[in-house]
């Protein structure tokens, strides 16, 4: 009830001052109140698919690969091909290729004139984002649905709509849960092919070879494999095997399938924790949000209190979400189309990378037509996994801005006989196709003030304002969401926009709070005491040093490492 009472106060404080200009306690209280209002007004039900198969016995304490039975009362919730949810009414564009044409948007506003670095971060932060997005966000597509033709020879597969859905919704290829499907897979034969028969999974080249095979599947996210993503696949495959080794020491009688499933559960929770308390504070580095985001996991009482005393009551505010009660806030859980849009952060990717004496273009580091093994070949060429991690840890990603989209990705080479595609244009099409509001409507949806001039939108940058105005014919309300998100001024320490942050504020906590394995089942009985300790006591730095002790990453491994990080 106290949190509910905060909502009107938070909105008044936000309108008058803004959370980022308030002292920490007031700023934090404002964010808590804003989040509660978002939960009340910005969750829309798009339906839950029916499940006819009975609940398997293992579903009580294991994640099922297809995402069913996480919610045992609504077993289809969050499963593969469950529709994306909504944070507001859908506004599908009847002609996603209409004016300004997405390729015009790309050419006029996305072209990287010169690389703009985000100097406080490193490229591992960009690679990590891709690693996690491959777990969560991919629209289902089928050849029979057809394509959007960005150019005469540039097809983009259409997303699959749910017939007669209201609001309009589209199917997800992946589960909506934080279940590490980007590593373990969600379909056969890949899931079985990477297992070693003793509870472990393949690592190094053997793992990458299986990923390369999976990349040949239609619409497979694995087709965008590059060195940075490959390194994280290897790193967390090794972490899985380390968890299996520890479980085997404590539970020598366990079957291999139980070892595998329990290690997957622990490893995926560890990834969720790293994303929450390390990656996110690096990306949104304002002092208030750093503490607020960490409180999502440990509560306002903090990590030390959690470790010493456990949870203090059921409150997510005091003791964090893990171990609290599952709460869908009255709407079946699903990741949302708006969440997909604010995670379109391709400007983080540089075009060129340095590995010792070598410099490579992104295209030379990625899985490409006729060079499907290129990521693993490059890792070996530059001295192995540790050397490659070290190189990416010391280089900055790009700023999330207009005029900073990687040129390599504006003509991205695709395998499977497909012609190159402009991913910047594809980002625009997908948001229009799936009914994500244009920028000013997006802000209104979140009860945020709407810019009244192009100069205000661009934070006073006259040249950027003129470029947007010219492209959109002076119609501020026509500006695409992605364009506005890149253009708007950012809070201090933020890599992305305040508008995007409002969606994160709502959905980042929902991803945890709706998931039984982070709430009601985040217990020693489900994870084992060993597993919970592993999650709570392990950091990203620990993972790096456990498997590559020659590395010496920064205190937050997603920030720039010291230049001398190992021999």
Image (spheres, rainbow, N blue to C red):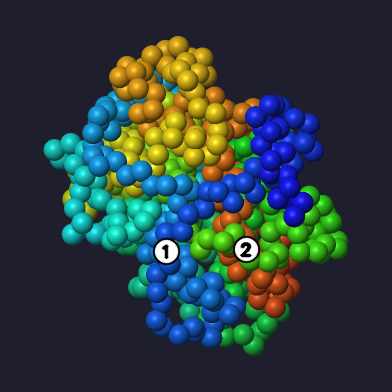
Disc assigned to residue 327:
2
User: Are there few (<14), some (14-19), or many (20+) residues within 10 Å of tag 2?
Assistant: some
Write down the quadrant of residue 562 in the picture: top right
Write down the quadrant of residue 264 in the picture: bottom right
Under circle 1, the secondary element is loop
Q: Earlier in the sequence, mark 2 or mark 1?
A: 1
Residue depicted at x 38% and y 14%: 466
The answer, for residue 335, to whether it is visible in the render is yes
Q: Position of residue 287 (x, y in %)?
A: 72, 35
Q: Position of residue 312 (x, y in %)?
A: 82, 62
Q: CA distance from mark 2 to mark 1?
A: 17 Å
Q: Position of residue 486 (x, y in %)?
A: 46, 30
Mark 1 and mark 2 in contact (Cβ < 8 Å)? no
Residue depicted at x 21% and y 44%: 148
Q: Position of residue 317 (x, y in %)?
A: 75, 53
527 vs 50, left or right, is right
According to the image, label 1 marks what residue?
Answer: 47
Q: Nearer the viewer, residue 9 or 180?
A: 9
Residue depicted at x 73% and y 44%: 6
20 vs 427, left or right, is right
Q: Nearer the viewer, residue 335 or 180?
A: 335
Q: Which quadrant would the N terminus be assigned to in this image? A: bottom right
Check the image and report above or below for 420 versus 261.
above
């Amino acid at each position: 009830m106290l949190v509910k009472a905060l909502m009107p106060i938070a909105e008044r404080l936000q309108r008058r001052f803004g959370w980022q200009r308030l002292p920490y306690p007031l700023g934090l209280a404002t964010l808590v109140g804003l989040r509660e209002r978002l939960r009340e007004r910005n969750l829309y039900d798009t339906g839950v698919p029916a499940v006819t198969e009975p609940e398997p016995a293992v579903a009580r304490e294991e994640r099922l690969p297809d995402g069913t039975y996480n919610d045992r009362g609504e077993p289809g919730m969050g499963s593969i091909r469950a529709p994306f949810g909504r944070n507001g009414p859908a506004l599908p564009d009847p002609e996603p290729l209409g004016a300004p044409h997405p390729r015009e948007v790309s050419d006029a506003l996305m072209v990287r004139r010169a690389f703009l670095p985000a100097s406080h971060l490193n490229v591992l932060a960009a690679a990590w984002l891709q690693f996690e997005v491959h777990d969560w966000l991919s629209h289902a597509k089928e050849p029979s649905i057809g394509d959007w033709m960005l150019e005469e020879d540039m097809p983009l597969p259409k997303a699959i709509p749910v017939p007669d859905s209201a609001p309009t919704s589209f199917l997800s290829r992946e589960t909506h849960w934080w279940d590490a499907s980007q590593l373990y897979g969600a379909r056969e034969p890949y899931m079985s092919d990477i297992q070693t028969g003793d509870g472990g999974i393949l690592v190094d080249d053997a793992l990458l070879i299986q990923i390369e095979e999976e990349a040949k599947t239609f619409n497979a996210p694995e087709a965008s494999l590059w060195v940075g993503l490959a390194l994280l696949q290897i790193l967390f495959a090794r972490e899985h095997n380390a968890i299996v080794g520890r479980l085997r020491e404590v539970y020598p009688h366990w079957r291999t399938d139980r070892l595998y499933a329990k290690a997957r559960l622990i490893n995926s929770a560890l990834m969720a924790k790293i994303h929450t308390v390390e990656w996110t504070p690096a990306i949104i580095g304002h002092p208030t949000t750093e503490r607020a985001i960490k409180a999502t996991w440990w509560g306002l009482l903090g990590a030390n209190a959690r470790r010493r005393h456990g949870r203090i009551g059921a409150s997510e505010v005091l003791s964090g979400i893990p171990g609290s009660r599952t709460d869908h806030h009255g709407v079946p859980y699903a990741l949302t189309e708006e969440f997909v849009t604010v995670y379109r952060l391709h400007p983080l990717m540089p075009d060129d990378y340095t590995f010792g004496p070598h410099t490579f273009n992104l295209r030379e580091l990625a899985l490409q037509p006729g060079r499907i093994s290129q990521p693993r070949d490059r890792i070996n060429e530059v001295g192995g996994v540790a050397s490659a991690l070290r190189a990416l840890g010391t280089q900055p990603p790009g700023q999330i801005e207009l005029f900073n989209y990687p040129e390599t990705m504006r003509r991205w080479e695709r395998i499977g006989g497909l012609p190159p595609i402009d991913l910047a244009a594809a980002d625009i099409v997908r948001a229009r196709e799936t009914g994500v509001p244009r920028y000013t409507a997006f802000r209104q949806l979140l009860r945020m003030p709407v810019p009244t001039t192009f100069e205000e939108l661009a934070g006073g940058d006259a040249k950027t304002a003129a470029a947007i105005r010219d492209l959109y014919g002076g119609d501020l309300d026509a500006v695409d969401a992605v364009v506005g998100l890149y253009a708007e001024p950012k809070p201090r320490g933020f890599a992305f926009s305040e508008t995007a942050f409002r969606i994160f504020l709502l959905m980042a906590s929902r991803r945890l709070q709706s998931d039984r394995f982070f709430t009601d089942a985040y217990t020693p009985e489900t994870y084992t005491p060993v597993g919970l300790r592993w999650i709570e006591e392990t950091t990203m730095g620990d993972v790096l040093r456990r498997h590559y002790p020659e590395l010496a990453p920064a205190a937050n491994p997603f920030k720039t490492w010291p230049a001398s990080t190992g021999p």
